[in-house]
Image (spheres, helix red, strand yellow):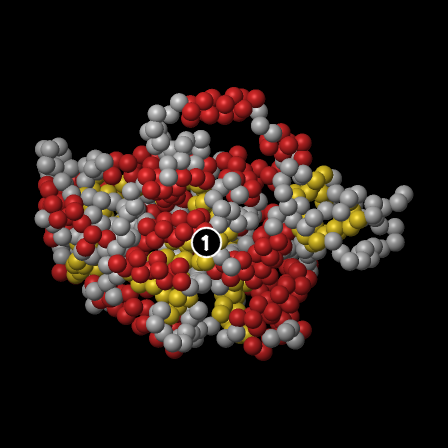
């Protein structure tokens, strides 16, 4: 039997750590362009793959073995562009994963499971859709005036002159001019409420005006920030380009929605893509601008599968394609701050980003005054200090809103028996089960194990088991009690509400709660970090942080940076509307209840002095040889026992030294240790830190080490190992 004349390499998602080749060879009857989507056989399964290239010479095949043929070509989709394949290849190398894993997981889940016939039906317009389009076109002709109806893809587009322009502040105008005049990348360091979003809108408009095929990618760290951003971009661009010009991409969408958005981006129908970290892999053939809002946020780092940083990939993608990149934040990451320089610097001071500064709030709004409350001087066991309750009461009585921040959901982190010392430990993890009073359950926030609260102590039968610590549920209950006699200006009782992951599980719940806050129906909002960033609350004039000190009790060297960022972002929710604050005769405030008011984090926060805080942190990191002055990776092992996990890591380190791997002398391998939460879902976890002063040396060493890790994993003595992974540039150790 003669083989088809053509051979191609295909990127396929092979089983993790199977040591199966990265690109697999298949035969096809016709030459296929790189980037073509195909379905190929692998074992007994049929999988989605991406044609990567065609070898110059047919691969050497053992005698008696035949290459398998491609099952089908997904002809309805244009090949993925070369720039997209370069991005995938770079991500695979840098983050130590296979090309197939990165490529296939970057595609919509529904596309992975579709046959060629199903895709053809999906792409074929239905009769019903044709009727709807005809009806919409007819309605368009009947429109009495442009803009009279809500913007849609078929609505008439008013001229740009019909849309009243927003006048930029002097700082915004200067930043916009700098972005237009330089290639970037840019670090837009703007205080909360300084108008960074308007700069994003203006630069987007400039990019779309400059090129009829241009596309813009705007990234946000969390799903809950996409609806309000989508509304702003639609309001600005739908009248000119139609509602179909803006699409969203995030994991909260259904599979059909994600496929629709991906196709719109891939075909160029969507001019603007708004998304979370996954959107960095969107196929955008006309990409000319990338915006990474809240670039400091840890959510941009993937924590499952390929541990990529979407922010760092955005920078690489911009450099590779020539697209401008804007990183925006009121509290930039120390890595980005260190990599930036002011526009007037003659030489980059270790930095390749152009740093643009917008220190003032829009409308001359004042930054919140920071008040530190020494809890050592307050009544013992008080959740809220009396001065803070008085300040919140005044706000309620004036019709203003307050935000109370505690980054811990549930009622209490643990239940405790004072008689025998029993604690509500998770039976499957080395962590406590959190007490949720609303449904009387104990939940593990690591593995999800849930059980009812026991009627008495399981250890000794004591009926008086007590909650230890505070969670958002408890704060909500305590505030409702303390404010029960406080009235709003309309003489209605004060209304306290909570927004966290527990109250927003249902579809549309978050949007409904945020709408209540914006409408003024909520007086005091209790929440976790999900409400502390990105939201534009116009009536909030007071923000309070409860128990922020707990974030500093950590071995993680990034803890001060994370706390400063969280508190600065939370403070930025107060006093954003200068006209409202002036009309109220109020002044925005940030209250911090702490047992260490002289801590450098709080000192810098009090003066809103991020540069001073960053300078101090960078000095400490330079002295300690920590990132960004060194480069790190972690190898993690999960096994049935802690001994097995550490034995695998120790064997891997020994193999690296004995094999004389490239740059082994340029890296330092620390001894294996248990992870901070060493058991999750009955699996023991250990880690080993690898550090180097040179990034290229670290990456080359890791890449050469992969084959040895696969070989060690296959040895009989490491049968108890469940999995292992490499995390480059880890955010937590």
Task: Residue lying at the far right in this picture: please name it.
Answer: 1
Using residue 74 as the reference point, say whether residue 674 is left or right of it.
left
Residue at the image position 23 percent from the left and 53 percent from the top: 362
Residue at the image position 11 percent from the left and 53 percent from the top: 387
Question: Is residue 156 or residue 429 the one in the foreground?
Answer: 156
Q: Residues within 10 Å of mark 1 (few under 14, many from 20)?
A: many
Question: Is residue 281 or residue 559 the one in the foreground?
Answer: 281
Quarter of the picture containing the N terminus is top right
- The quadrant holding residue 659 is bottom right
Coordinates of residue 165 in the picture (x, y in percent)? 30, 46
Residue at the image position 57 percent from the left and 37 percent from the top: 110
Coordinates of residue 254 in the picture (x, y in percent)? 49, 35
340 w.r.t. 722: above or below: below
Coordinates of residue 232 in the picture (x, y in percent)? 35, 42
For residue 83, say whether it is visible.
yes
Residue at the image position 58 percent from the left and 55 percent from the top: 83
265 w.r.t. 132: above or below: below
Question: Is residue 29 or residue 459 the one in the foreground?
Answer: 29
How many badges with numbers are in the image? 1
Question: Is residue 7 or residue 491 the one in the foreground?
Answer: 7
527 w.r.t. 625: above or below: above
Say which residue label 1 marks: 289
Using residue 364 as the reference point, say whether residue 678 is left or right of it.
right
For residue 432, say whether it is visible.
no
Using residue 432 as the reference point, say whether residue 322 is left or right of it.
right
Quarter of the picture containing the C terminus is bottom left
At mark 1, the secondary structure is: strand
Coordinates of residue 376 in the picture (x, y in percent)? 16, 61
72 w.r.t. 408: above or below: above
Using residue 644 as the reference point, say whether residue 495 is left or right of it.
left
- The quadrant holding residue 108 is top right
């Amino acid at each position: 039997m003669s083989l088809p004349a053509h051979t191609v390499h295909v990127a396929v998602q092979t089983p993790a750590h199977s040591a199966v080749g990265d690109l697999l060879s298949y035969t096809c009857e016709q030459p296929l362009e790189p980037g073509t989507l195909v379905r190929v056989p692998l074992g007994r399964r049929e999988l989605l793959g991406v044609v990567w290239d065609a070898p110059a010479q047919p691969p050497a095949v053992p005698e008696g073995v035949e290459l398998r043929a491609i099952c089908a070509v997904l002809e309805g989709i244009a090949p993925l562009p070369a720039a997209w394949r370069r991005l995938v290849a770079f991500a695979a190398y840098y983050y130590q994963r296979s090309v197939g894993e990165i490529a296939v997981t970057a595609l919509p889940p529904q596309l992975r499971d579709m046959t060629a016939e199903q895709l053809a039906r999906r792409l074929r317009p239905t009769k019903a859709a044709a009727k709807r389009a005809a009806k919409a076109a007819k309605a368009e002709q009947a429109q009495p005036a442009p803009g009279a109806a809500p913007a849609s893809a078929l609505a008439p587009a008013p001229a740009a002159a019909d849309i009243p322009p927003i006048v930029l502040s002097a700082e915004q105008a200067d930043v916009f001019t700098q972005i237009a005049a330089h290639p970037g990348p840019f670090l837009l360091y703007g205080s909360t409420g300084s108008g960074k979003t308007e700069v994003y809108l203006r630069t987007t408009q400039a990019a779309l005006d400059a090129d009829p095929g241009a596309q813009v990618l705007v990234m946000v760290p969390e799903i809950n920030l996409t609806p309000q951003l989508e509304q702003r971009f639609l309001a600005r661009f739908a009248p000119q380009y139609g509602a179909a010009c803006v699409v969203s991409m995030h994991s909260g969408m259904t599979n059909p929605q994600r496929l629709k958005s991906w196709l719109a981006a891939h075909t160029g129908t969507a001019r603007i893509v708004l998304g979370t970290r996954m959107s960095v892999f969107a196929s955008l053939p006309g990409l000319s601008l990338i915006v990474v809002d809240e670039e400091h946020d840890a959510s941009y780092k993937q924590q499952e599968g390929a541990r990529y940083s979407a922010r760092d990939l955005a920078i690489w993608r911009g450099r590779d394609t020539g697209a401008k990149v804007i990183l925006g934040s009121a509290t930039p990451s120390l890595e980005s701050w260190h990599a930036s320089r002011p526009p007037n610097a003659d030489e980059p001071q270790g930095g390749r980003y152009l740093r643009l500064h917008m220190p003032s709030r829009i409308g001359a709004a004042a930054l919140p005054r920071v008040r530190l409350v020494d809890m050592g001087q307050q009544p013992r066991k008080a959740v809220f200090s009396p001065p803070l309750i008085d300040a919140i009461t005044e706000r309620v009585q004036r019709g203003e809103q307050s935000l109370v921040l505690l980054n811990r959901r549930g009622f209490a982190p643990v239940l405790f028996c004072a008689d025998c010392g029993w604690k509500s430990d998770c039976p499957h993890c080395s962590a406590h089960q959190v007490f949720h009073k609303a449904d009387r359950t104990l939940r593990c926030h690591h593995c999800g194990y849930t059980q009812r609260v026991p009627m008495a102590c399981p250890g000794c039968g004591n009926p008086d088991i007590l909650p230890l610590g505070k969670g958002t549920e408890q704060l909500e209950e305590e505030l409702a009690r303390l404010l029960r006699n406080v009235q709003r200006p309309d003489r209605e009782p004060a209304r306290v509400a909570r927004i966290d992951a527990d109250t927003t599980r249902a579809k549309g719940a978050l949007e409904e709660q945020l709408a209540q806050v914006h409408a003024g129906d909520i007086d005091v909002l209790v929440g976790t970090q999900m409400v502390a960033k990105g939201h534009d609350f116009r009536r909030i004039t007071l923000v309070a942080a409860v128990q922020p000190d707990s974030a500093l009790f950590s071995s993680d060297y990034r803890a001060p940076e994370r706390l400063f960022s969280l508190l600065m972002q939370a403070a930025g929710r107060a006093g954003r509307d200068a006209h409202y604050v002036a009309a109220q005769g109020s002044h925005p405030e940030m209250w911090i209840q702490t047992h260490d008011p002289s801590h450098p984090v709080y000192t810098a926060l009090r003066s809103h002095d991020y540069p001073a805080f960053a300078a101090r942190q960078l000095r400490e990191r330079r002295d300690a040889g920590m990132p960004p002055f060194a480069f790190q990776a972690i190898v993690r092992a999960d096994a049935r026992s802690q001994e097995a996990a550490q034995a695998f890591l120790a064997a891997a380190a020994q193999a690296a030294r004995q094999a004389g791997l490239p740059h082994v002398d340029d890296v330092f391998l620390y001894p294996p240790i248990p992870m901070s939460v060493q058991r999750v879902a009955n699996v023991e976890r250990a880690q080993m830190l690898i550090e180097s002063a040179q990034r290229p040396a670290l990456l080359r060493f890791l890449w050469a080490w992969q084959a040895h890790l696969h070989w060690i994993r296959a040895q009989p003595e490491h049968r108890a190992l469940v999995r292992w992974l490499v995390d480059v540039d880890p955010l937590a150790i």
